[in-house]
Amino acid sequence: MPGLEAIRLHLADEVLPLWHEVGLATGEQDPALPYWAFAWAGGLALGRYVLERPETVAGRRVLDLASGSGLCAIVAALAGAAEVTAVDIDRRAIAAIQLNAKAAGVRVEPLRRDILDEPPPDVDVVLVGDCWYEAGLARRVLPWLERVDAAGIDVLLGDPGRRYLPTERLELLATYDVRTTTELEDLAQKTASVFRMARPG
């Protein structure tokens, strides 16, 4: 991964064979997309930003929302975060986070739970990569992030400009060209940006 060469992750090369194997292994007719087996464009950009600016997380408590493969959580740990929690609702994502954190030689606390109806967490920084691809999720994520931001917690987001990204609430920090897979994105190379929540006033 350009700009993230120091990160070791267990990732899949192709979506469809893995998707098929998950269905066979679980007996599910229509298993969920194995998003946890890939590095998505927004997470790649956010990871690069944090590695280039470790002061954003160094010595701080970090939560990675919808962590997937654990990429952003692992980057935060490598950049010197005091504590890192990786949250996802998918048990396979939790397994992937554990495997990838071990491969990277860092400590990440996985948490399988939907926290979007809960109060802001007791952390200093929330990282959010690639959460704006679906309207229903976006409607839940944004109010929660606004509550997190209002509590004085720093919120950093990475995204390649998907349809539901709330750009009017965000301040652009950096833009990167990142390489992903055409099975997940429409292009092998995407432009993805990093934002922070823009506090009113």
Image (cartoon, rainbow, N blue to C red):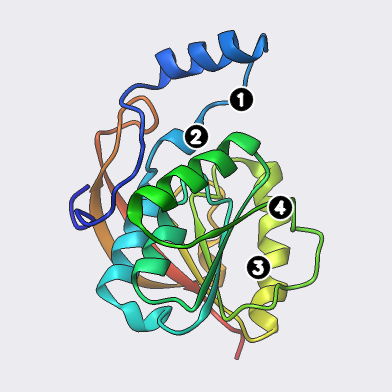
Q: Could you tell me the amino acid type at mark 4?
A: Arg
Q: Secondary structure at mark 2?
A: helix
* Residue 80 sits in quarter: bottom left
Instruction: List the residue tagged with mark 2.
Output: 35
Q: Identity of the amino acid at label 3?
A: Leu
The residue that disc 3 covers is 145
Can residue 198 be seen here? yes
Is label 3 or label 1 in front?
A: 1
Question: Which mark identifies residue 173?
Answer: none
How crowded pointer 3 is (Cα within 10 Å; few <14, some 14-19, many 20+) is rated as many
Q: Please give the name of the residue rendered at 46% of the width and 60% of the height, measured from the top-left corner.
A: 73
Q: Is residue 88 left or right of residue 67?
A: right
Q: Which residue is mark 1?
A: 32
Q: How many marks?
A: 4
> In this rendering, does residue 42 appear at all?
no
What residue is pinned by disc 4?
139
What residue do we see at 65% from left, 43% from top? 135
| Label whose residue precedes the other's in the sequence (1 or 4) | 1
Tag in front: 3 or 4 = 3
CA separation in Å, label 3 and label 4: 11 Å
The mark that comes first in sequence, 3 or 4, is: 4
Q: Secondary structure at mark 4?
A: helix
Q: In the image, is residue 174 above or below residue 65?
A: below
Under tag 3, what secondary structure? helix
Q: Are marks 3 and 1 in contact (CB under 8 Å)?
A: no
Question: Marks 1 and 4, Cα distance to the nearest angstrom?
Answer: 20 Å
| Residue 57 screen position, x and y as percent | 43, 78
In three-dimensional space, the C-alpha distance between marks 2 and 4, rounded to whole angstroms, equals 20 Å
Q: Are marks 2 and 1 in contact (CB under 8 Å)?
A: yes
